[in-house]
Each structure stands twice: as structure tokens, then as C-alpha cells.
Amino acid sequence: DECADEEAAARGPPRPATQPPEFLGGAHPDFVYIRGFLMPGNDLYEAGAHPPMTAGEAAEVCLADDACDSFTFRAAGPGRSGVFFKRAVAEGGGVHRAPDWHTYRRRRPRTCPASSPEEARTLAVDVLREQPLVAVIRNFATRETCDALVRAGGGWEEMGRSHTSRGGPSQDRRSYSSNIEPPLRDPGHPITRVVAEMFAITRNLSGYAVYPRGQEPVNAVLYRHVGDEYRPHCDG
């Protein structure tokens, strides 16, 4: 996926490299520096989970947690600052320019190694509705992939009620669920592969240039009780 994304980006004007201010300790080999901040949300840790720290100390914390994609903080000079650690954010987006704000995004291996002859196969598609598009992809996932998704989703007792962004349950989302974070730094992982294939099919069917990075995680949904359902609702 990132190979196609990079090829498309190469056709546009190149983006100049940005170097962090010297008081932050210079560039870090495992991170890309971006001037600005990441919007609230998608935080990896609860507020106050870590004491104020330098950019170098924050980089070590992020590298120690495979789920950490980036961190953002405000600093106008040398010293320690409160740092917000984030899960995956959108490629090339999500960073807002602002004075004295700094963001470091973790460098990741390209997902090109996830490609294989299987991805060039022909799939049967049943279009249930054209506007908005609703389609069923026949024989999409392998047994290995299905087993990996079931294991990652956990047992029934581990699933919680579906919640809204405000933190409470919704009568429109009467189900239980758990999030499955694809390990995007492991292109050969079966969940990473199936997520890449999902987005490849979505691009082919919809024409939208969507890629795994920055998207919501895969969601395992359980309808446990009679009457459980997802009713039509608005997100946001």
C-alpha cells in the first residue's frame, strides 16, 4: 500500500525535510520531525501517565511500546514538557501548524513486502447496493486469517458494550465489541496482510485513495442478546 502511495506522491511536488530545533537535541534516526501538533484523541496513555520529559526521553518511551506511532508536545526552549503519545495517525496529515509545538512520527518499514501473487487473484463481488455502495467479497479471507482475527478479538467475556466517542453506550449500537489493532510494522502478519487487502479492494471498488495508516482499528462485534443490532446512526 505504501509503495502505491509513494509512487503517487512522487508525481507531485516534493515535500521539504524539516529539522527539529537544536534545543530539542537534533534529529532522531527512528522518527520524522514535523512542526505542529496532533489533535486531541487517539491517545495511547491516560493523561498524567508519564512525567514531563525531553524529546529524547519521549522517543525512548515510544520505541519501547509497539503500539506507539507518534508523540506531540509544546516547548519553546530547553527542558522537559508534558508529552502526548499517539496511536497511528493519517499519513501526511493530522498535524496542525502552531508556534512552539512539535511532533515526532515513528519511521515504519514500507508494507511492500506484504505483497504476494495471491493479491493478484480474481475475487467474486456481489453488489447489494450501488448508492451508497454495499458489496460482499466472496472467499476473501483464508482460514489462517480468520483464525488470527478470532484470536485477536478475544473471547466473549473480554468484549465490552459498544460505546460512542462521548464514552457511554448507545441504543443505536446494541452489541459488544473489541478493537483489533493491526501490527503495521509487521507486513507479514496475517492481520496486517488482510487489512492491506481490505483497503486495496476498497480502493478498487470506490475509487478513493484510502490506506491502512490512520484508520480505525478492525472491530470484532458480538451480538450476544436477542434484539442486539446496529441501527442506522450518525458518527461524529
Image (cartoon, rainbow, N blue to C red):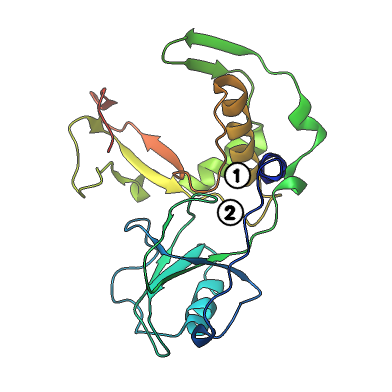
Task: Using the rendered image of the protein, determine whether residue 66 is visible from the camera's viewpoint.
Answer: yes
Quick one: label 2, few (<14), some, or many (20+) residues within 10 Å?
some
Q: Residue at x 28, y 71 (%)?
A: 47
Residue 178, compared with residue 102, is above or below; it is above
Q: Which type of secondary structure does the marked residue at label 2 adopt?
A: loop
Q: Residue at x 25, y 32 (%)?
A: 173
The amino acid sitting under disc 2 is Pro
Task: Using the rendered image of the protein, determine whether residue 68 is visible from the camera's viewpoint.
Answer: no
Residue 105, compared with residue 221, is above or below; it is below
Q: Earlier in the sequence, mark 1 or mark 2?
A: 2
Quarter residue 191 falls in: top right
* Label drawn at residue 191: 1
Quarter residue 148 falls in: top right
The amino acid sitting under disc 1 is Ile
Q: Residue at x 76, y 40 (%)?
A: 115
Residue 95, compared with residue 30, is above or below; it is above
| Residue occupied by mark 2 | 183
Quick one: label 1, few (<14), some, or many (20+) residues within 10 Å?
many
Q: Quadrant of the C terminus?
A: top left
Looking at this view, name the residue that lies furthest to the right. Answer: 117
Tell me where residue 190 appears, x and y as whole percent: 65, 44
Looking at this view, name the residue that lies furthest to the bottom. Answer: 79
Q: Which type of secondary structure does the marked residue at label 1 adopt?
A: helix
How many numbered circles are shown?
2
Kindly report the distance in space between the C-alpha atoms of the residues bearing marks 1 and 2: 7 Å
Decide if residue 83 is on the left or right side of residue 230: right
Viewer-proximal residue, 119 or 152? 119
Tell me where residue 145 appears, x and y as whole percent: 63, 38
Tell me where residue 159 appears, x and y as whole percent: 35, 46
